Image (cartoon, helix red, strand yellow):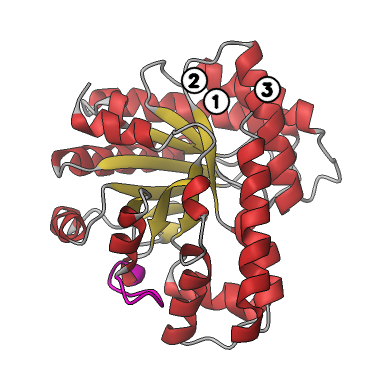
Amino acid sequence: MTDLALIARALFTPGKGVLAADESVHSATARLASYGIPTSAEMRRQYRDLFMGTEGVEQYLSGVILFSETMLEKGNDKKLFPESLAARGILPGVKVDLGTEPISTSPQELITQGLLDLPERLAEYKKQGAVFTKWRAVVRIDGDQLPTAAAIHENAKRLAQYAKEVQTAGLVPIIEPEVLLEGKHSRARSRAVIEEVLGTLFSVLEEHSVDLTSVILKTSMALSGSESGKKDTPEEVAEDTIAALMQSVPRKVAGIVFLSGGQTSDEATANLAAITRRAKEVHAPWPLTFSYARALQEEALSLWGGKEENVLAARTAFLGRLSKVSAALG
């Protein structure tokens, strides 16, 4: 097994998962504002430290995805965040895409940017301590109209180019084709789109000679759209999600992490538990874990409110949620 494959597998240490702390400046500002927390560069640093500075997170976290800004910041322990994480056995990673823009031929769909100077940035992130990276593509469902095959293929191509560059730089790529929850679509439609997106993606990865043994897939769960009026049971979600993955993901992929996009903390936890159970029943060939952002942070952020006196209560809530999500891995 190559060194990269070993690093990839290390993110799937039993009972542990990945914290997605890679919100851009814009997203982090909006997230804090939604909890009534004043926003500034220092408040963003404190927000990162609230989670990464929590004592005991190494029991539940194998890795943390950072934003480029955070790679160069220090926690309250006066250590750079990547160094502090690595010292506790948590692998530091970094988001390397530069966000999305509308596709000229299909303005309702988005394409991800960031390939232009990627090799230079990867070299820099590696020096800063990153051992893995993440690139997110966004797939929107709208009836039978969206996604278009052209948008799926263009995003797959960029994910493949990214993955190849990352492996060449000696880092592990997480590929994230997120099928958005927004919309009126059924769970069956969500499953079909996940299958189409992943089928195309892995075909294009093979064309680019990407080594799948050190690729991690970050995927959405198969869920009814947020405006569909349908509430899926965890068992329904698990059945369709695992069926889509078994249909579309090659056995040799290093592992699969799930995103929580749009779900509450309790929904993301219950759905993960059902997915893990279902995967065992059908002998799914890959290790599975979580890579959550909001579903891990929500309770802690509402308790913290940006105030020093609330840090302990917020961190206790964060550890409590981590413990529940870890238990969901079975």
Q: Mark 3 — residue?
A: 277
Location of residue 216 with respect to 52 vertically, above or below: above
Q: Residues within 10 Å of mark 3 (few under 14, many from 20)?
A: some
Q: Where's the C terminus, which quadrant?
A: top right
Location of residue 298 with respect to 190 vertically, above or below: below
Q: Residues within 10 Å of mark 1 (few under 14, many from 20)?
A: many
Q: Where's the N terminus, which quadrant?
A: top left
Marks 1 and 3: in contact by CB < 8 Å? Answer: no
Q: Nearer the viewer, residue 272 or 243?
A: 272
Q: Is residue 218 left or right of residue 89?
A: right
* Disc 1 secondary structure class: helix
Which range of residues does the magenta coloring cover?
70-79
Res 172 quadrant in image = top left
Residue type at mark 1 is Glu
Q: Residues within 10 Å of mark 2 (few under 14, many from 20)?
A: some
Res 221 quadrant in image = top right
Location of residue 113 with respect to 253 vertically, above or below: below
Residue type at mark 2 is Ser
Residue 20 appears at what percent x and percent y? 48, 54
Q: Mark 2 — residue?
A: 248
Residue type at mark 3 is Arg
- Which of discs 3 and 2 lies nearer the camera? The answer is 3
Residue 195: give its label: 1
